[in-house]
Amino acid sequence: MRQINFVIIFVICLALVLFGIENTDPAVIRVAQGIELQAPLAIELIMAMGIGAVMAWVFSVWTQLQRVIDTRKDLKVRDVRIQELEENVERYKAEIEEQQRLLPAAKPRPGVEQDAEAEVYAQ
């Protein structure tokens, strides 16, 4: 991919150089009423392309910054939700323990306890 990018940039720069060599005639730019700049056409177009590239870069950085801010907001919302769910789990565990404590203890069947003890000793 780097090679393709290099070729594209090289071709654009070569075209700009060839364009600049051919267009050395001065041109007038009227910025505002009473403000005029005079420079070769090639220089003016190269400056316009440079300004456009800088604006594209600024827009790209702005978009990435907005994406990072949105991601952080989403992470904060998720962290709050995770905390709520963990609190719910702890509350449910406490409720289950309370219910188990209130249940009557199971009475062992005769012989079952003895069979379990026999298995332990057999091992």
Image (cartoon, rainbow, N blue to C red):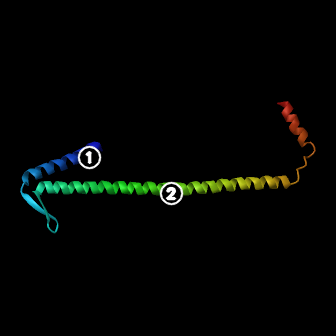
**x and y percentages locating residue 90 in the rendered image:** 71, 53
For the N terminus, give its image quadrant: top left
**Residue sitting at 62 percent across and 54 percent down?**
83
**x and y percentages locating residue 35 in the rendered image:** 15, 64
**Residue sitting at 55 percent across and 58 percent down?**
77
Of pointers 2 and 1, the one earlier in the residue sequence: 1
For the C terminus, give its image quadrant: top right
Q: Nearer the viewer, residue 36 or 109?
A: 36
Identify residue for label 2.
73
**Residue sitting at 6 percent across and 57 percent down?**
25
**Callout 2: few (<14), some (14-19), or many (20+) C-alpha neighbours within 10 Å?**
few
Which element carries disc 1, helix, strand or loop?
helix
Q: Residue furthest right?
A: 110
Identify residue for label 1.
5
**Residue sitting at 20 percent across and 46 percent down?**
10
Q: Amino acid at mark 2?
A: Lys
